[in-house]
C-alpha cells in the first residue's frame, strides 16, 4: 500500500497510526510523507504498483488535492486489470466528501481504516 498526506496538509499523526496498525498486520507500506503533490503520488503508484492507495488530510482544504490526486492516479492506472482501490482518511471526511473526491472508501479513524482496508483486500 502506498500512503500519503496530500499537498497542502502537513498533519501525519492519523496516517502514522494507520501505518503502524497495517505494519503490525503484515502489510507492506510505502509512506510518501506529508504535503505530497499529486504527481509525486501518481509516480509512486506507477513505480510501486501497490494493491491499494491511501490518502490522508486533516483539513477540508485538502479535498481539492485529494480530488486532483485521485483523478491523476485513475488516469495513469486505467489500463490495470483490476482498478486500484483508493481509501481516503481524515477527521473531517464523510461519505459526501469521499464521493466528491472520487474515493472508493473513507474513514475518520485508524481502527475503521484498518477494517475497511482489510475488506478491500478481499475483493
Image (cartoon, helix red, strand yellow):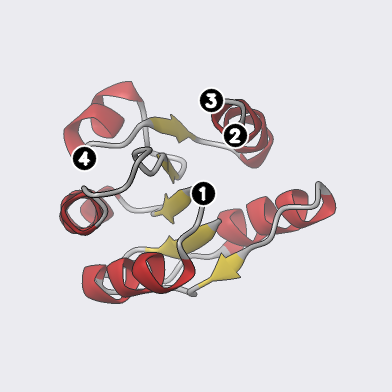
- Report crowding for label 3: few under 14, some 14 to 19, many 20 or more residues within 10 A (C-alpha): few
Q: Earlier in the sequence, mark 4 or mark 1?
A: 1
- Report crowding for label 4: few under 14, some 14 to 19, many 20 or more residues within 10 A (C-alpha): some
Q: CA distance from mark 3 to mark 1?
A: 11 Å
Pointer 2 with pointer 1, Cβ within 8 A: yes
Residue 27, position as x, y percentages in the image: 71, 53
Mark 2 = which residue? 121
Q: Earlier in the sequence, mark 2 or mark 1?
A: 1
Foreground label between 3 and 4: 3
Q: Earlier in the sequence, mark 3 or mark 4?
A: 4
Judge left or right: residue 69 versus residue 2. Answer: left
Foreground label between 4 and 1: 1
Mark 3 = which residue? 123
Pointer 3 with pointer 2, Cβ within 8 A: yes
- The front one of 91 and 15 is 15
SS for callout 3: loop
Mark 1 = which residue? 51
Pointer 4 with pointer 1, Cβ within 8 A: no
Mark 4 = which residue? 101
Q: CA distance from mark 4 to mark 1?
A: 20 Å
Residue 34, position as x, y percentages in the image: 44, 73
- Report crowding for label 2: few under 14, some 14 to 19, many 20 or more residues within 10 A (C-alpha): few
Q: CA distance from mark 3 to mark 2?
A: 6 Å
Foreground label between 4 and 2: 2
- The front one of 41 and 5 is 41
Q: Earlier in the sequence, mark 3 or mark 1?
A: 1
| Residue visible at 26% across and 74% down in the picture | 37
| Residue visible at 39% across and 64% down in the picture | 45
SS for callout 4: helix
- Report crowding for label 1: few under 14, some 14 to 19, many 20 or more residues within 10 A (C-alpha): some
SS for callout 2: helix
* Quarter residue 20 falls in: bottom right
Amino acid at each position: 500500500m502506498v500512503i500519503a498526506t496530500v499537498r497542502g496538509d502537513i498533519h501525519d499523526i492519523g496516517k502514522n497510526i494507520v501505518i503502524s496498525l497495517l505494519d503490525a498486520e503484515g502489510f507492506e507500506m510505502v509512506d510518501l510523507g506529508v504535503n505530497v503533490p499529486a504527481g509525486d503520488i501518481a509516480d509512486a503508484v506507477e513505480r510501486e504498483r501497490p494493491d491499494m492507495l491511501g490518502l490522508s488530510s486533516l483539513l477540508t482544504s485538502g479535498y481539492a488535492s485529494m480530488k486532483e490526486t485521485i483523478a491523476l492516479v485513475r488516469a495513469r492506472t486505467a489500463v490495470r486489470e483490476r482498478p486500484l482501490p483508493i481509501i481516503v482518511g481524515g477527521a473531517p471526511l464523510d461519505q459526501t466528501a469521499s464521493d466528491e473526491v472520487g474515493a472508493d472508501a473513507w474513514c475518520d479513524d485508524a481502527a475503521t481504516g484498518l477494517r475497511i482496508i482489510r475488506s478491500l483486500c478481499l475483493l
